[in-house]
């Protein structure tokens, strides 16, 4: 994990805000600095052009040397010179006196056209010169005007100092404001965190406070509360599951214990002991089936039900189910019939498919009446596997919860079933990408069926 990822989010937001403000202030300072320099340079250049035009006009009007010298009078920090083609000073202001302002090379360039020079010979003071060619008394001369740049440098220096002092101060104030703004924006999140920390397993009905603003934090609160609703429902189902499982396990364990205690209470004949052992074996098998069913449900809840998918012919599976349960049906005076097209085929786990159909046949034999029909039908890329009886059907109030775990039409739990048979059927169907359904037939009897896709991969 990087160092930045370990920094609290409010500090990260404040840091990001500070970096953005620093970039903005730097860009603004650079822009102001450039604009001020450009504006001052433009003003200086305009003044030099105006001054050079005035000097040129005066030089052209006064062609004698004495008169020309008289008109070159400096004003403020400006100065001027008139030099001939050889670089000799023809006329000058008091500053810089008789020292030529231009070198011979610069004079030659100025005679060809106006030039600008950024230095004054013999001085370290910053200055700017403008040299323009003209004619006086029939000869070519160069008029040189200049001005000191000290005021410009001073103005720019004052701006730089102001930026160096005001910039960090503004950045510090903006950073503090950014931190406070981030803290204020995240306050609802902190409130939700505190509330979430106080929610315990015994207090699952509490919910997080949701701010009224329709923003990301409000949506986060709504999402977290919806998650808490799901967790509360899951925990309630888990509690109910544990309670029901405990109840179902207690009955066979109690009966097994009773049988063993009665067998040991006094001397028994061999026949009596055998009868007690047979009864204990039946309860043990019931416990084993219940434990296996609970294991299937637990695996389904974790999404780890191990399916071994392969091509399966539903007709063959139904026929094996019929053969397995036919002796039991005969003892009860019931008939089993199979109706399935031999060409039907789907991708499924054959063992789990037999378990689901076996559960349906068990229910039909236990609670139904008449002929029990096992049917496979292909419908729009799916296979429907029906188990239909001719009994009284399901109680109307039970149909809506028929596939719930430990749900039984006999709410008193006096029957032998565990209430897991149909729940197992549904989890197996859903593991295959299908579903299970139950309904009462109009002519009487119950119809319970699985709908499975023909092709199932993964």
Image (cartoon, grey):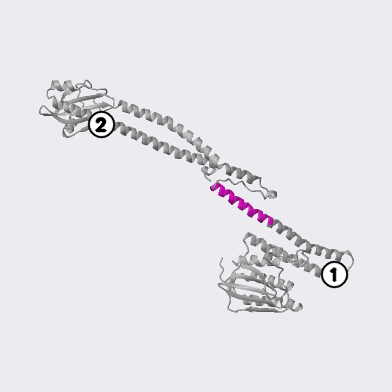
Name the foreground residue: 338 vs 396. Answer: 396
Quadrant position of the C terminus in the picture: bottom right
Circle nearer the viewer, 2 or 1:
2
At which x and y percent is residue 123? 26, 24
- Residue highlighted by disc 2: 46
Name the foreground residue: 212 vs 89. Answer: 212
Q: In the image, 243: left or right of 456?
A: right
At which x and y percent is residue 318? 65, 76
**Residue at (51, 43) in percent of width and height:** 4
Q: Which residues are magenta?
A: 215-236
Tag 1's secondary structure? helix
Examine the rendered structure and indicate whether residue 225 appears above or below residue 287.
above
Tag 2's secondary structure? helix
**Residue at (19, 26) in percent of width and height:** 55
Examine the rendered structure and indicate whether residue 11 appears above or below residue 368.
above
Say whether residue 313 is visible. no
- Residue highlighted by disc 1: 273
Q: Earlier in the sequence, mark 2 or mark 1?
A: 2
At which x and y percent is residue 322? 68, 77
The main secondary structure of the magenta stretch is helix
């Amino acid at each position: 994990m990087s160092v930045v990822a370990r920094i609290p989010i409010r500090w990260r937001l404040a840091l990001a805000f500070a970096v953005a403000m620093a970039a903005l202030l730097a860009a603004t300072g650079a822009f102001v600095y450039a604009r001020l320099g450009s504006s001052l340079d433009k003003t200086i250049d305009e003044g030099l052009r105006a001054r050079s035009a005035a000097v040129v006009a005066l030089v052209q009007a006064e062609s004698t040397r004495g008169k020309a010298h008289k008109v070159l009078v400096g004003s403020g920090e400006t100065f001027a010179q008139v030099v001939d083609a050889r670089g000799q000073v023809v006329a000058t202001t008091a500053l810089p006196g008789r020292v030529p302002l231009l070198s011979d090379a610069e004079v030659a360039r100025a005679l060809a056209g106006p030039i600008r020079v950024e230095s004054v010979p013999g001085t370290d003071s910053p200055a700017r010169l403008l040299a323009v060619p003209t004619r006086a008394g029939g000869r070519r001369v160069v008029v040189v005007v200049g001005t000191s740049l000290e005021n410009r440098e001073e103005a720019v220096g004052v701006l730089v100092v102001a930026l160096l002092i005001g910039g960090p101060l503004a950045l510090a104030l903006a950073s503090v404001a950014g931190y406070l703004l981030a803290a204020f924006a995240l306050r609802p999140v902190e409130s939700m965190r505190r509330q979430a920390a106080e929610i315990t397993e015994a207090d699952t009905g509490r919910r997080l406070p949701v701010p009224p603003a329709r923003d990301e934090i409000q949506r986060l609160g709504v999402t977290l509360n919806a998650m808490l609703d799901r967790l509360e429902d899951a925990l309630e189902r888990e509690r109910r599951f544990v309670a029901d499982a405990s109840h179902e396990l207690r009955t066979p364990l109690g009966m097994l214990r009773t049988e063993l205690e009665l067998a040991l209470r006094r001397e028994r004949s061999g026949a009596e002991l055998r009868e007690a052992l047979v009864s204990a074996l039946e309860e043990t098998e019931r416990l084993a089936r219940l434990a296996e069913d609970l294991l299937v449900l637990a695996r389904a809840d974790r999404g780890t039900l191990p399916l071994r998918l392969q091509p399966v012919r539903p007709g063959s599976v139904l026929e094996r189910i019929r053969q397995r349960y036919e002796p039991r049906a005969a003892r009860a005076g019931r008939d089993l019939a199979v109706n399935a097209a031999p060409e039907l085929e789907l991708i499924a786990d054959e063992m789990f498919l037999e378990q689901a159909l076996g559960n349906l046949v068990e229910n039909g034999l236990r609670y139904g009446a008449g002929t029990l029909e096992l049917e496979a039908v292909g419908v729009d890329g799916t296979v429907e596997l029906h188990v239909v009886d001719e009994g009284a059907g399901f109680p109307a109030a039970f149909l809506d919860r028929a596939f719930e775990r430990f749900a039984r039409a006999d709410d008193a739990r006096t029957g032998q079933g565990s209430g897991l048979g149909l729940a197992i059927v549904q989890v197996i169907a859903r593991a295959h990408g299908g579903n299970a359904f139950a309904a009462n037939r109009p002519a009487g009897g119950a119809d319970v069926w699985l709908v499975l896709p023909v092709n199932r991969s993964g």
